[in-house]
Amino acid sequence: MKFFVDTAEIDQIRELNDLGMVDGVTTNPSLIMKSGRDIKEVTKEICSIVDGPVSAETVAPGAEDMIAEGRELAKIADNIAIKVPLTWDGLKACKVLSDEGRMVNVTLCFSANQALLAAKAGATFISPFIGRLDDLNLDGMELIADIREIYDNYGFETQILAASIRNANHMSEAAKIGADVATAPAAVIKAMANHVLTDKGLESFLKDWASTGQKIV
């Protein structure tokens, strides 16, 4: 499974990229706001760091304006994936932009029917929002499984990009189900390394090593 980091913070992206833990980046208007930077400026810098897709989101409500914004965002770098919402206008924009050979990430997906429409419209990525479904006591992972089954049934090439990831368990569950990509905040990706038994074992090893009085260097 590919890891995308869901942030517009350059330091976080650099750290994970240097470790080989980033295959792409997703941004949205809220993350751009938090960065406090100009969308084109910060997106261009992100694209210079990461080789994989960098999602930049349109904000217009209508298809024609979405298409215009998408074309403008695509000028930033070759690895831009244009994000459009899963609305009827968003699907229209997806079709036009994907037919032009651009990567398109259709976001805010909450049903298998929506995912099917996005694949038919030529989406490169479909972004089902796991955490927001869980917030409503619905099973976000069940949605991932349903989309996986539908896409496999018909050979759709649209990649399932599990989004709204809240914790490390979401990452492993999405991987087991077969999501192609998961996008998560940097803190969630780093938390995947944590385990209480690892900490306990390391503490024991270091205590025993200290008692030997030895040094390696």
Image (tube, rainbow, N blue to C red):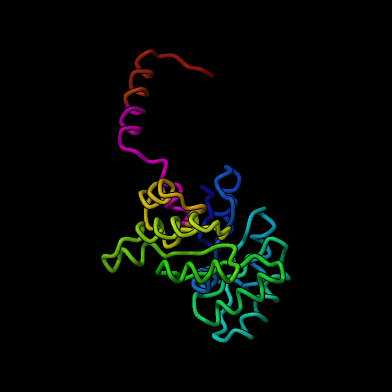
Q: Is residue 16 left or right of residue 197?
A: right
x 56%, y 74%: residue? 84
Q: Is residue 100 above or below residue 199?
A: below
x 36%, y 28%: residue? 202
> Which residue appears farthest toward the front when viewing the image?
154
Seen from the viewer's position, the closer of residues 198 and 79 is 79
Magenta-highlighted residues: 184-203
> Which residue appears farthest toward the left when viewing the image?
137
Seen from the viewer's position, the closer of residues 112 and 102 is 112
Q: Quadrant of the C terminus?
A: top right
Q: Which quadrant holds residue 123?
A: bottom right
Q: Which quadrant holds residue 94?
A: bottom right
Q: Residue 149: horizontal and vertical position, in percent?
A: 43, 56
- Most common SS among magenta residues: helix
Q: Is residue 176 above or below residue 56?
A: above
Q: Residue 173: horizontal and vertical position, in percent?
A: 38, 49
Q: Residue 89: horizontal and vertical position, in percent?
A: 55, 82
Q: Is residue 86 above or below residue 144?
A: below
Q: Is residue 52 left or right of residue 199?
A: right
189 drawn magenta: yes
The number of callouts visible is 0
Seen from the viewer's position, the closer of residues 94 and 79 is 94
58 drawn magenta: no
Q: Residue 6: horizontal and vertical position, in percent?
A: 50, 60
